[in-house]
Each structure stands twice: as C-alpha cells, then as structure tokens.
Image (spheres, rainbow, N blue to C red):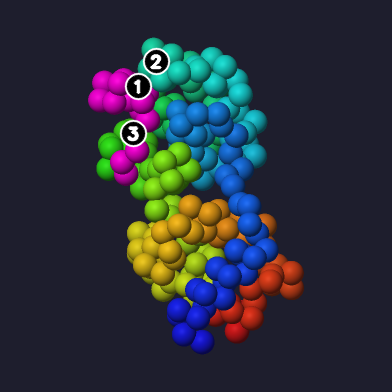
Amino acid sequence: MTLAQRYEAILGYFRENVPIAESELHFDSPYQLLVATMLSAQCTDKRVNMTTPALFSAYPTPEALAAASEEEVYELIRSISYPNSKARHLVGMARKLLEDFGGQVPSGIDDLMSLPGVGRKTANVVASITWGEPVIAVDTHVFRVARRLGLSRGTTPRAVELDLEKHIPEELRPIAHHWLILHGRYICTAQKPNCASCPLTQWCKSFK
C-alpha cells in the first residue's frame, strides 16, 4: 500500500462514518476557546470543562482577565495541571490581546503565537476552529495516531504537522484534526490501544 492509498483509505473511512467531529472543549467565543485550549495542555478536556465555567463567569472578557492578578486566576484553575504557569500565561495573554489586538483574538498563526503561553498547537486549534484556517494542530493524540497509522514518520510535532498538511486536502484539515484526536482519545490510546475495536487496522502500519 502506498502512502497516498493509506491516506485515501483512512480519510475515506472517517468521511463516511464520522461526518461530524468537533472539539470536546466547551466555549462560546474565540476568547473562551483560546483560554480553554491554553488550559488543556497536558490536561484532559473533561477537567478543563469542569474548571472554565467559574473562570468565564469571573472573567467574561479579555479586559476582565487582563485586570486580574495571577493569584486570583490561580485560585480558579488550581485543579488544572501546571496552574501557576497557566495563570501567569492567561493574564499575560489577555493583556497582550488588549495592547496589540484591541482585545480581539487574531486569526493569524504568528499573531496567535505572539501571545504568552500560546504555542503552535494552541494557535492551530484556535485558527482552525474559529477561522477555518487549513492547519492541523498536532497534540499528543494526533502525533501518536499519525505515526501508528503510518501517515507520518515525523519525530517532532512540527514534522508530523507538515506531513499531514501535505497529504490532507485543505477542506478536510479542520475535521481531520478532530478525527485523529478522537481516535487517539478513545481507541488508539497511548498505553493500551483497543485494536480489537479499531476500524482502521486493515490500513494501520503499526498493526500489521
């Protein structure tokens, strides 16, 4: 099986059987998505969704968050992984949003990455979901699944991102990101992948 055939088969399966795939984070605006995605680094979406209602209630806008202290934010996100650094990044992000972007979440990847605490994965998530940018965010799930399936041999998230974007059509990239994340979250898990229930084994390089 060629690489092109592998992509065609796997994308074809998802397109046919998983026509709807969306972020499991809860948000109502680009600002809330940015905050939730920053909090989700090395933390489950479930835990983030338990934490953000109080945070969004206390700081419903970038202006409100920018006026907060790191200590105040910390108290609301202390159950999240790395709460000290994330509190610092959230406040810094909000202040830079006001200073450089008029309080609006920018659409450009480089602009997003200029915000404190926003790396390429977070920038790609926000740009893809909010603005429909043809990018693929590579988190641990996407990195693992792409390599196991044989969609990429990349040894870094950036290398995997480039491979996926090279072979996945632009119009499919926003949903393909979610296909791979959800597959990694619920089937192709890190420690004990559920190959017996996986519909992709016939095309999976790791399984063969």
Task: Look at label 1 and name its amino acid.
Answer: Gly
* Left or right, residue 153 beside residue 96: right
Instruction: Indicate which disc, 3 or 2, sits on the residue closer to the N terminus.
Output: 2
- Can you tell which mark lies on residue 106? 3
Q: Which label sits in the foreground, 3 or 2?
A: 3
Measured Cα–Cα span from mark 1 to mark 3: 9 Å
Residue at 54% over, 15% down: 58
Instruction: Give the image location of residue 45, x and y in percent.
Output: 60, 41
Q: Quadrant of the C terminus?
A: bottom right
Instruction: Give the image location of residue 172, x and y in percent.
Output: 49, 59
Instruction: Give the image location of residue 99, x and y in percent.
Output: 26, 21
Measured Cα–Cα span from mark 3 to mark 2: 15 Å
* Left or right, residue 25 beside residue 115: right
Q: Is 107 located above or below residue 207 in the figure?
A: above
Task: Look at label 3 and name its amino acid.
Answer: Pro
Mark 2 neighbour density, 10 Å: few (under 14) some (14–19) many (20 or more): some
Instruction: Give the image location of residue 95, x and y in percent.
Output: 33, 21
Task: Look at label 2 and name its amino acid.
Answer: Glu
Q: Are marks 1 and 3 in contact (CB under 8 Å)?
A: no
On whether residue 108 falls in the magenta region, the answer is: yes
- Can you tell which mark lies on residue 103? 1
| Secondary structure type for disc 3 | loop
Instruction: Indicate which disc, 2 or 1, sits on the residue closer to the N terminus.
Output: 2
Q: Are marks 2 and 1 in contact (CB under 8 Å)?
A: yes
On whether residue 169 falls in the magenta region, the answer is: no
Measured Cα–Cα span from mark 2 to mark 1: 7 Å
- Can you tell which mark lies on residue 63? 2
